[in-house]
Image (cartoon, rainbow, N blue to C red):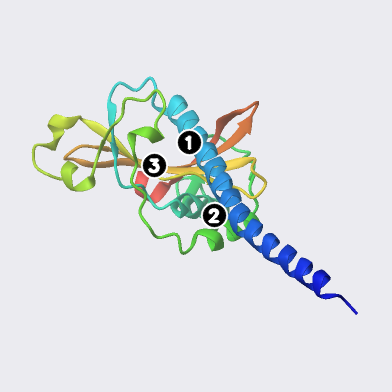
Amino acid sequence: MKSKKTIVFITFQKKCLKKTTLIIFPILCFLFSCSSTNIEKQILNDFLNKEFITDKYICILVEEAIPKTKALDFYENAYKDRNLVKTLGFSPIGSPPFTWEVDSIDVAILKQKYKNDTLVYHWKSSDLIDHKLKIFPYKTLKKRGSRELGEYGIYLSKPIITSNKKYAFIFYRSFAVEVGFSSEKAVLLKKVDGTWKILYYYVNNSEVN
């Protein structure tokens, strides 16, 4: 039979363990969140460096981010339409043969994971590294005379990273201020030697044409 001292000691250990768990768990969650945020920031800025760093006309980023699942929709539809004539449906940009780096199972997992992620993210200047994009809310850009702020801009989604951490998706729309959209694309990126490289763009050909 356990003595009173033993019982008291065991109870004390359990309380200490519980308190330690309560302290450590939030710290781990915070560290994981910071790690994910840093990876997303690297993906975003590697993409912008490739796509817009030399573009003298794109100077505005719409503050409200596009839903990140939009890129998954384009990729999934392009895969479903892969046997259609390229001018129909969704497709990658470029010449075949195309490789489908992310399988349909992973896409389904990602769509399930983010299906309830409906909060609109608002871009901040701290999200951008070495980019001079001016950030304005949509309501400002739709006002008459907003073209004085800049001629061209982009809407942009936050990145989605695949389960194996090797690939990422981004979606964006470019537009002429006070005129409208000019194009929208999903982008698949792959991490190569520490940098996120663009593999493919995916478009809706019915809108392009």
The number of numbered badges drawn on the structure is 3
- Residue 70 percent location from the top left of the image: 44, 53
Name of the residue lying farthest toward the right: 1
Is 81 left, or right, of 192 in this rendering? Answer: left
The residue pinned by badge 2 equals 76
Q: Is mark 1 on a helix, strand or loop?
A: helix
Q: Nearer the viewer, residue 83 or 47?
A: 47
For image coordinates 20% across by 29% down, the residue present is 150
The residue pinned by badge 1 equals 41
Residues at circles 2 and 3 in contact by the CB criterion of under 8 Å: no
- Residue 31 percent location from the top left of the image: 57, 44
Amino acid beneath label 2: Glu
Mark earlier in primary sequence (1, 3): 1
- Residue 140 percent location from the top left of the image: 16, 43
Q: Is residue 209 visible to us here?
A: no
**Which numbered mark, 1 or 3, is in the foreground of this view?**
1
| Label 3 packing within 10 angstroms: few (<14), some (14-19), many (20+) | many
- Residue 16 percent location from the top left of the image: 68, 60
Amino acid beneath label 1: Lys
